[in-house]
Image (cartoon, helix red, strand yellow):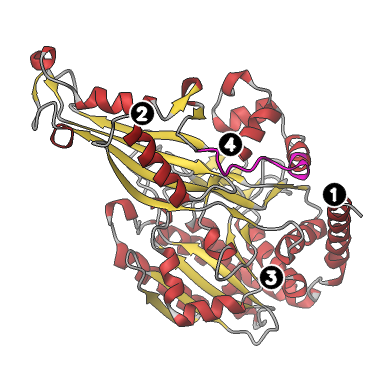
Amino acid sequence: MDRRTLIKGAIASAATLSSAAALASAPPASKLKAIRRAVDADFDRSLTRIKDWMRLPTVAAEKLNVEQGADYMAKLATEAGFTRVRKVATGGNPAVFGVLDAGAKRTIGLYFMYDVKQYDEPGWSSPPLEPVMFDHPMGRALRGRGACNHKGPEGTFLAAIHAFRAAGVPLPVNLVLLAEGEEEIGSPNLRNALKDAEVLAELQRADAVFMPTPMQGLKGEVAISLGAKGMIECELIASGERWDRGAVQDIHSGMKAAVDSPVWRLIEALSTLVKDGGNTPAIDGWFEHYRPLTDRQRVMLAKLNGTSTDAEVKASLGVKKWIDDLPLAEAMERMTSEPTVNIEGLVAGYTGPGGKTILPTRATAKLDFRIVPDMKAADCVAKLRAHLAKRGFSDIEIKVSGNYDPTETSETSGLVLAQQAFLDRRGLEHTITPRIAGSYPGYIYTGEPLRKPFNQFGLGMGGKAHAPDEFYLIESNNPKVAGLREATMGHVEFLYMLASIA
């Protein structure tokens, strides 16, 4: 039997197991009713818990509220019933660890983040740290920084744990929590938490790990992701001091006729990193370890692309055209499969009102690189340095703030089977996608030494993460799209499914 036939057989067997499990692992109706009553009774407190958490932003890039954020995460975990809760030293912002031992046969790991992105963008409809409810086309939603990324969905999972306790129903699985405060700068120190013997031992007990995340689209559909791209975030800095040209301080722009400009030097260096108008990485050796999509992954994407129209996807993103005017299917394939070089921001000279005739001595470009299997972050950073040096740009300073490798989980893993079975039982349309276009530090769990299945999962919907008017749906006007109550119950039922399959 050839390899392709074996793979098809494994997938078919997995689908059969998923459907059978959807029927076999249904929790007792009496327990679900009791938990649902607790969810309804605790709704206001659950919403307040999320709002209060949003009012305390931990911004790793600014070292804002680091200890306060970790302490608050520990407080939330303790109140939800986790024990042995403590901060774990990482060399950066502390992680927060806790366990909830229900005496169950299976153990599930939880990945949380307690940090958020900066919130100084113009265009907010209300103050970003003052959570407000507003009318959204999908119902009533909560607006503010951290609403969907990731305090809203994590608060929803905590609401499920509170409901179990309030209903007097034991959890069907044990839980191990590891929360970090540096996800938004590339999780540079999360791996160090595994140097803690207790953290490592408890996570090794886990059958799978997941991150509570609202995964539903506008019609209630869910795309189960098998992984994420890796990420490198860094700054490239050109300065007169390091270049030994230009000036060591800003000077009058009239001097440009005789003095070199570090700003133009940086632009020249940046232009060597890409081709095709910035759409294709051109760094030497960048594609050396690039792995193309498999036939099976292309089938996954074809099914995913059939769930929304080109116009719907463009409208949801505020995009008018794809690269090279590609059709939706090819654009989605690029999002899934292609590494990227992106300029997040450019800072140089005077940026205030009017003009200021200076020749700046310093210019900074903030970049992020998304990488795919089998590319490695450390190797890519080395290639970036070598590429610039080969072209005479050794003076360009490279400051890496965070990086991690791509992550992958098998579609036949217990975690993914449980997700499919749960969605089958709920009657929700779902597809599988090879990976998301963004990144999260799943490699910490899927790589050595843990090698656990890991991905994101949950009902509900949110949007505009990292942007003004970030939101999380609280009360849905579509019965197939979960609001806070139904998303909470979704976690309850999913834990029962994990108890049977994971």
Q: Is residue 178 above or below residue 202?
A: above
Would you say residue 160 sits in the magenta stretch? no
Mark 3 in CB contact with mark 4 (< 8 angstroms): no
**Pointer 1: what residue?**
4
Residue 215 position, x and y percent, is: 64, 50
Mark 2 in CB contact with mark 3 (< 8 angstroms): no
Q: Earlier in the sequence, mark 2 or mark 4?
A: 2
Q: Is residue 132 visible?
A: no
Q: Residue at 70% x, 66% y: name it.
A: 494
Instruction: Determine whether the residue tagged by mark 4 lies in a helix, strand or loop.
Output: loop
Q: Residue at 63% x, 47% y: name it.
A: 435
**Pointer 3: what residue?**
495
> Mark 3 against mark 1, which lies toward the viewer?
1
Q: Going by the picture, which residue comes out furthest to the right?
A: 1
Residue placed most toward the observer, 451 or 27:
451
Q: Earlier in the sequence, mark 1 or mark 4?
A: 1
Would you say residue 290 sits in the magenta stretch? yes
Mark 1 in CB contact with mark 4 (< 8 angstroms): no
Q: Which disc, if any, is residue 270?
A: 2
Q: Which disc, if any, is residue 338?
A: 4
Residue placed most toward the observer, 462 or 420:
420
